[in-house]
Image (spheres, grey):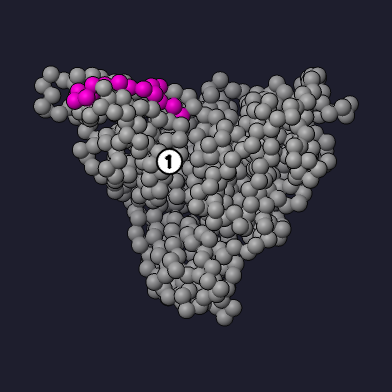
């Protein structure tokens, strides 16, 4: 179906909004090596970025969640500090991707892949062509992404699951990746996806998919995909018996709680385990973009992947290797401090990285509602772990600069911990089966660029956290990011690992997610309350990561029953803090690392007064407490990143 549509050009105003960049410690440490700069946005343009794509004129096309496509002349700011924005297209239904080929833009709307052209060359779209369409139920969670254009010109799109208390495929091919030709011919490509907002090609043209934490998804991850593969979430298997499906697994074979993904996948054809896990809140909370570094002009990491994170407003780095035909590897922090939640990234012609952002409804550490920024390598070499490779005895670490040998040769400078996640229908997973891995030897290469670690206790199917303490470059430079997370899916031939036991049972120690002090989360009415509570408060959520009440008033000394119903599609809690300490408690929750999920992201701090547990979607909990002395007591959701917007005041009279 082809529809012609005239769009009135919008010449933008002269006033531009300046986007600020957070000045936290990590940002300041990273800035000398990778510099973030702002691309000014006119006040009249709500640039909630859904997609980025350069055209043949080196203009930057930007799709927005509001259904527009803007084109920016001179995004590099070579001619002017105020680039020209022109409205190319409008009236689209929430496009969350943008691609460009052969003179036309391509984007996925909620229900179709659309080709958008300017046939009369006046700078305005006048031809909107449906390349391929799919049904929608109207569920708000039915986002669509793509197309990723393959080297042969074919296109890949992915369809988000619907949300009905868990991820479900309410209409055909939801939870799938589809391959679509220019003529509209569609081939189901792979399934097992929940919220597949990010997918991309590595330097060899292999396809990698990123996922966010959710039901059946213990933590963020990237997975290598080929046609016919299954990536872990069973809802899309509803359509595996349909004509054209390359997947043979059945939905009925998945119980609500299975154990560990790595174990369950063994022996099942085309069941792909994650190539790299991104530990939740430690590395990020919402993977959003994958882009390969294909040039030396961006620093010393050519051939690796950059992975964006929407919730933490940052970019991570991934090093991949193939062992026994299976992809695995390590992820590292890379660059923090972006102004909003990262959704898309695109390379400029000068190999600078353009970063498009949005946060409406999806909270982010970057405080701005949207933004467009540019990341440039300054040419200065950071001291980093450039690569982490598995060996028959442990790991080989490669650095960007020679290390100080006497420091790097001390095994005590390296700490390793192995852990994994549960594979179940519940939303997310705590860290389980955590155990130390002893580093017994560290051998430095003659040139000082590599260190070989001998490690005991490594396990297949597990993530292995590496922390380096005290090792510097030969000149004394500290390692910019002295931590890494390596996922082991296979050991190399001739391995000497004697402790590579298979993943253990689903032992969720501390999985209640309810803090360390039970007196702050009393879930049964105290026996002394013979007349019941003096006041009963019902709380819920509303769209945009908000509590449905932002002000609660109670009398000092009153007996309070507070019921929090989590009617959202993600994990939440409710934490009442001491006056003036809401932001501090939120930050402490973000800093909890691997221990966060097991403690419900409740910091063990006197700043915390009362709290619920970490509550699953569509579940609720009541807590009982006596109102403190008069004052304003902030309450927040302390799930990492949520406290910036999900907050209110308990006013005690």
Q: Residue furthest bottom?
A: 446
Nearer to me, 615 or 606: 606
Nearer to me, 567 or 406: 406
Task: Specify whether residue 492 is in view.
Answer: no
Question: Quick check: 450 left or right of 427?
Answer: right
Query: Is the C terminus in the top left, top right, bottom left or bottom right quadrant?
Result: top left
Residue 293 at x, y percent in the picture: 67, 54
Q: Mark 1 points at which residue?
A: 640
Question: Quick check: 640 left or right of 554?
Answer: right
The magenta-colored residue range is: 545-561
Q: Residue at x 57, y 38 (%)?
A: 340
Residue 128 at x, y percent in the picture: 77, 24
Residue 175 at x, y percent in the picture: 55, 34
Q: Does the magenta stretch include residue 560?
A: yes
Q: Is residue 529 magenta?
A: no
- Badge 1: residue crowd in 10 Å (few <14, some 14–19, many ≥20): many
Residue 404 vs 35, above or below: the answer is: below
Which of the 4 image quarters holds residue 357? top right
Nearer to me, 618 or 480: 480
SS at mark 1 in the image: loop
Query: Is the N terminus in the top left, top right, bottom left or bottom right quadrant?
Result: top right
């Amino acid at each position: 179906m082809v529809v012609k549509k005239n769009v009135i050009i919008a010449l933008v105003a002269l006033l531009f909004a300046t986007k600020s960049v957070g000045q936290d410690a990590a940002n300041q440490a990273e800035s000398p090596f990778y510099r973030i700069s702002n691309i000014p946005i006119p006040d009249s343009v709500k640039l909630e970025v859904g997609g980025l794509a350069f055209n043949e004129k080196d203009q930057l096309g930007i799709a927005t969640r509001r259904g527009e496509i803007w084109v920016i002349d001179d995004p590099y700011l070579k001619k002017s500090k105020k680039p020209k924005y022109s409205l190319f297209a409008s009236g689209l239904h929430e496009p969350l991707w943008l691609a460009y080929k052969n003179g036309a833009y391509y984007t996925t709307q909620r229900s179709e892949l659309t080709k958008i052209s300017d046939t009369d060359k006046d700078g305005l779209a006048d031809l909107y062509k449906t390349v391929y369409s799919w049904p929608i139920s109207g569920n708000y969670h039915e986002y669509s992404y793509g197309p990723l254009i393959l080297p042969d010109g074919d296109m890949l799109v992915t369809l988000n699951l619907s949300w009905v208390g868990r991820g479900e495929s309410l209409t055909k091919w939801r939870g799938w990746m589809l391959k679509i030709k220019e003529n509209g011919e569609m081939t189901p490509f792979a399934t097992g996806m929940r919220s597949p907002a990010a997918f991309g090609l590595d330097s060899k043209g292999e396809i990698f998919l990123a996922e966010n934490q959710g039901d059946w998804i213990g933590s963020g991850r990237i997975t290598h995909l080929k046609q016919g593969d299954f990536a872990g979430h069973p809802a899309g298997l509803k359509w595996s018996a349909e004509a054209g499906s390359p997947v043979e697994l059945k939905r009925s074979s998945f119980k609500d709680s299975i154990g560990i993904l790595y174990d369950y996948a063994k022996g099942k054809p085309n069941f792909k385990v994650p190539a790299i896990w991104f530990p939740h809140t430690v590395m990020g909370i919402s993977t959003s973009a994958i882009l390969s570094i294909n040039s030396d002009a961006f620093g010393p990491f050519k051939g690796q992947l950059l992975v964006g994170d929407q919730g933490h407003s940052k970019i991570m780095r991934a090093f991949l290797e193939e062992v026994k035909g299976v992809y695995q590897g390590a992820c590292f922090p890379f660059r923090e401090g972006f102004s909003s939640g990262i959704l898309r990234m695109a390379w400029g012609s000068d190999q600078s990285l353009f970063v498009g952002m949005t946060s409406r409804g999806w909270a982010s550490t970057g405080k701005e509602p949207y933004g467009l920024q540019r990341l440039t390598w300054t040419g200065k070499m950071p001291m980093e772990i450039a690569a982490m490779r598995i060996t028959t005895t442990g790991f080989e670490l490669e650095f960007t600069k020679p290390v100080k040998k006497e420091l790097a040769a001390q095994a005590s400078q390296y700490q390793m911990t192995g852990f994994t996640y549960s594979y179940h229908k519940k939303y997310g997973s705590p860290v389980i089966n955590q155990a130390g891995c002893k580093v017994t030897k560290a051998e430095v290469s003659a040139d000082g660029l590599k260190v070989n670690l001998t490690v005991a206790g490594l396990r297949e199917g597990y993530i292995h956290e590496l922390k380096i303490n005290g090792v510097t470059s030969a000149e004394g430079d500290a390692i910019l990011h002295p931590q890494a997370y390596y996922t082991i899916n296979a050991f190399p031939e001739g391995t000497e690992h004697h402790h590579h036991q298979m993943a253990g049972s689903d032992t969720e120690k501390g999985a209640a997610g309810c803090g360390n002090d039970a007196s702050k989360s009393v879930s049964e009415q105290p026996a002394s309350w013979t007349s019941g509570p003096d006041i009963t408060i019902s709380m819920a959520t509303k769209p945009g990561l908000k509590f449905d009440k932002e002000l609660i008033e109670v009398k000092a000394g009153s007996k309070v029953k507070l019921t929090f119903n989590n009617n959202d599609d993600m994990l939440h809690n409710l934490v009442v803090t001491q006056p003036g300490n809401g932001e501090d408690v939120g930050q402490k929750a973000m800093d909890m690392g691997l221990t966060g999920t097991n403690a419900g992201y409740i910091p063990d701090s006197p700043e915390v007064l009362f709290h619920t547990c970490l509550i699953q979607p569509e579940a609720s909990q009541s807590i009982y407490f006596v109102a403190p002395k008069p004052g304003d007591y902030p309450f927040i959701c302390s799930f990492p990143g949520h406290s910036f917007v999900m907050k209110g005041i308990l006013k005690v009279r």
